[in-house]
Image (cartoon, rainbow, N blue to C red):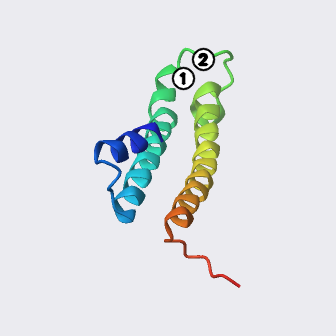
Amino acid sequence: MVKVQALIKEKGGNMSNKDQHWAKTKSLLMITLAIWFVFSIGIFFFGAEMEASSFRPLGYPLSYYMTCQGSLGIFVILIFWFAGRQEKIDEEFGYSEREEN
């Protein structure tokens, strides 16, 4: 959000509605990709260190199995969070797909 406001000030406040919408959307996308990276790749680097038991469901260490299941849950939450935030950005700039009654 701060970067978007700085970009608007940098251009003298003369950014078009479309440019402001794209700047906020791009910022949201980068945040979402960073969260996705942490939970899809970053967390698995520590799976071996989290091994606490010898129980191995489906032949994998329990910590690895639980990490995979947790990541799937985070991804579902991330999808709904992203969609909600994007809808707010779209409404702010008049690009919402919701029908007014």
Residue 70: where, in percent of width, then height?
A: 64, 38
Name the side, left or right, on which 60 lies relative to 26. Answer: right
Q: Give me the disc on residue 50.
A: 2
Name the residue nearer the viewer: 58 or 37. Answer: 37
Picture quadrant of residue 73: top right
Q: Is residue 35 above or below residue 49?
A: below
SS assignment at label 1 = loop
Count neighbours of disc 2 (C-alpha within 10 A) and say few if under 14, some if 14 to 19, many if 20 or more: some
What type is the residue that disc 1 sits on? Gly
Residue plotted at (32% across, 56% down) = 14
Residue underneath mark 1: 47
Name the side, left or right, on which 76 lies relative to 32. Answer: right
Count neighbours of disc 1 (C-alpha within 10 A) and say few if under 14, some if 14 to 19, many if 20 or more: some
Name the side, left or right, on which 85 lies relative to 9. Answer: right
What type is the residue that disc 2 sits on? Met
Picture quadrant of residue 2: top left
The reply to whether dot 2 and dot 1 touch (C-beta < 8 Å) is yes
Q: Is residue 24 above or below residue 2?
A: below
